[in-house]
Amino acid sequence: MDASDCSFRNNLNRMIILRCFGAENYYLERVIFPFEILNFTAPQEAEVEIWSHEFGGAELVESFKVAELHT
């Protein structure tokens, strides 16, 4: 498994949840507070989802490949 060092900054003024999943049962889920930076290592082919919680429930805000977060 080739891994990438990644960095994600929450630019929103509310808490979000980052979910990252990939090969070989890789899974990462972290709460990120407003303007906080999360650094992590993930498989190069992994997918990232950014979730927020609104009045109606959980909402997918954004999704992309982990390669976009390569540091």
Image: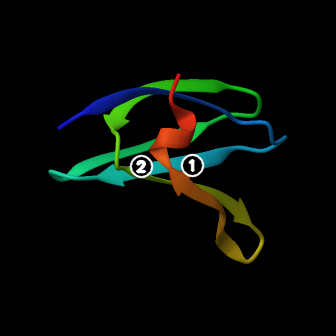
Residue 32 location in percent, x, y?
61, 36
Question: Is the C-beta separation of discs 2 and 1 under 8 Å?
Answer: no
Mark 2: amino acid: Cys
Point 78% across, 71% down: residue: 55
Q: CA distance from mark 2 to mark 1?
A: 10 Å
Give the residue type at disc 1: Ile
Instruction: Please name the residue that numbered disc 1 is placed on.
Output: 17
Residue at horizontal 50 percent and vertical 30 percent from the top: 70
- Mark 2 burial class by Cα count in 10 Å: few <14, some 14-19, many 20+: many
Residue 49 makes an appearance in the image: no
- Left or right: residue 29 versus residue 52 is left
Q: State which quadrant residue 69 falls in.
A: top right
- Looking at the image, residue 2 lies above or below residue 5: below
Q: Secondary structure at mark 2?
A: strand
Location of residue 26 in the rendering, given as x and y in whole percent from the top left corner: 24, 47
State the count of labels: 2
Q: How is the image coloured?
A: rainbow
The 10 Å Cα crowd at callout 1, few under 14, some 14 to 19, many 20 or more, is some
The answer to whether 51 appears left or right of 55 in the picture is: left
Residue 5: horizontal and vertical position, in percent? 41, 24
Picture layout, residue 16 above or below residue 35: below
- Residue 49 position in % (x across, y down): 53, 56
* Disc number lying in front (2 or 1): 2
Q: In this orientation, which residue lies closer to the viewer: 64 or 61? A: 64
Side of 6 relative to 63 (left or right): left
Above/below status of 25 relative to 60: above
Q: Nearer the viewer, residue 13 or 27?
A: 27
| Residue on which disc 2 sits | 20
Element under disc 1: strand
